Amino acid sequence: MEFACALCGDNHDPILFAQAVKVAEAKIELRAIRTQKVAVVERLRERHAAPFVSRDPTYKEMKARISESRQAEATIKVRLPELVAKYKSKIEEALGRHLHTSADSYVGIMRWFARHGFPEQDAVWIILEAMSDEPAPIDNEALDQVRKAIEAYQRDEHEALKAAAPDLVRLDRYECRAWSRQKRAIQEFMMIKVEARSAQRILAAEDGAVCETQVLAG
């Protein structure tokens, strides 16, 4: 609305203002399409994301996420006893209880937590929170493994742009149409403005001629 008012300036012609609104709408549409282009590429930085033009991208993404989730769950079950042994004192401090010696396997740990009123999901978070409070810095090897895992999970900019190409082609078509609509709207806006000025000049000329005739007749 503000952009349309700025286009019209001091001209309060409703027809001109309606056309200015069309120009503003086309401008907003173009901006939205360009923003969506950036979002499409950023979305496909994720390794398992698929273009929207695919027949069923959500199914592929869901399948990949389920597979990753199962792998993560298996890793947790293998590593959890080792982590509990390492952070035993902090876990006991957080719970205010001593871990039983039978809690030396994943099943044993979960049974111990369950007996004390903690479901499996809460038990895992308690252990992870105890790890996060560890003052000792993480070694470089662990940091390197984390970095590689993140890089493996994401595409680089070139791969993301390549994967986004089908979506970008479709957005290009929308952008061309929006650009054409904006161009037509601007042309019509200028035409209305020119015609209005021409009409004002004609009226001014006619008024001048009438006044001159009256003076001569007087």
Image (spheres, rainbow, N blue to C red):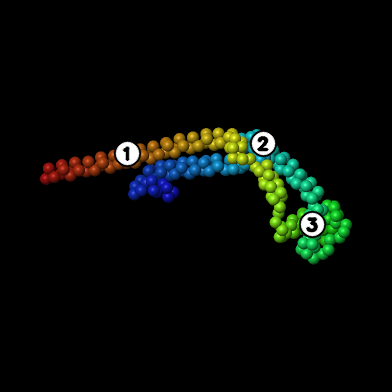
Q: Nearer the viewer, mark 3 or mark 2?
A: 3
Asked whether 168 or 161 is in front, the reply is: 161
Q: Which residue is mark 2?
A: 56
Q: Which residue is mark 1?
A: 195
Residue 158's quadrant in the figure?
A: top right
Give the mark, 1 or 2, whose residue is nearer the N terminus: 2
Q: Amino acid at mark 1?
A: Glu
Q: Nearer the viewer, mark 1 or mark 2?
A: 2
Helix, strand or loop status at disc 2: loop
Q: Which mark is residue 159?
A: none
The number of numbered discs placed on residues in the rendered structure image is: 3
Q: Estimate how packed mark 3 is, as few (under 14), some (14 to 19) or many (20 or more) residues with alpha carbons within 10 Å.
A: few
Give the mark, 3 or 1, whose residue is nearer the N terminus: 3
Cβ–Cβ below 8 Å for labels 3 and 2?
Answer: no
Helix, strand or loop status at disc 1: helix
In the picture as drawn, the residue positioned furthest to the front comes out as 140
Residue 165's quadrant in the figure?
A: top right
Q: Residue at x 71, y 49 (%)?
A: 141
Quadrant (top left/top right/bottom left/bottom right) for the C terminus: top left
Helix, strand or loop status at disc 3: helix
Q: Residue at x 76, y 63 (%)?
A: 94
Q: Which residue is mark 3?
A: 86
Q: Amino acid at mark 3?
A: Lys
Q: Estimate how packed mark 2 is, as few (under 14), some (14 to 19) or many (20 or more) residues with alpha carbons within 10 Å.
A: few
Q: Residue at x 85, y 53 (%)?
A: 105
Give residue 42's position: percent from left, percent from top: 59, 43
Give the Cα separation between the discs numbered 1 and 2.
52 Å
Give the Cα separation between the discs numbered 3 and 1.
83 Å
Give the mark, 3 or 2, whose residue is nearer the N terminus: 2
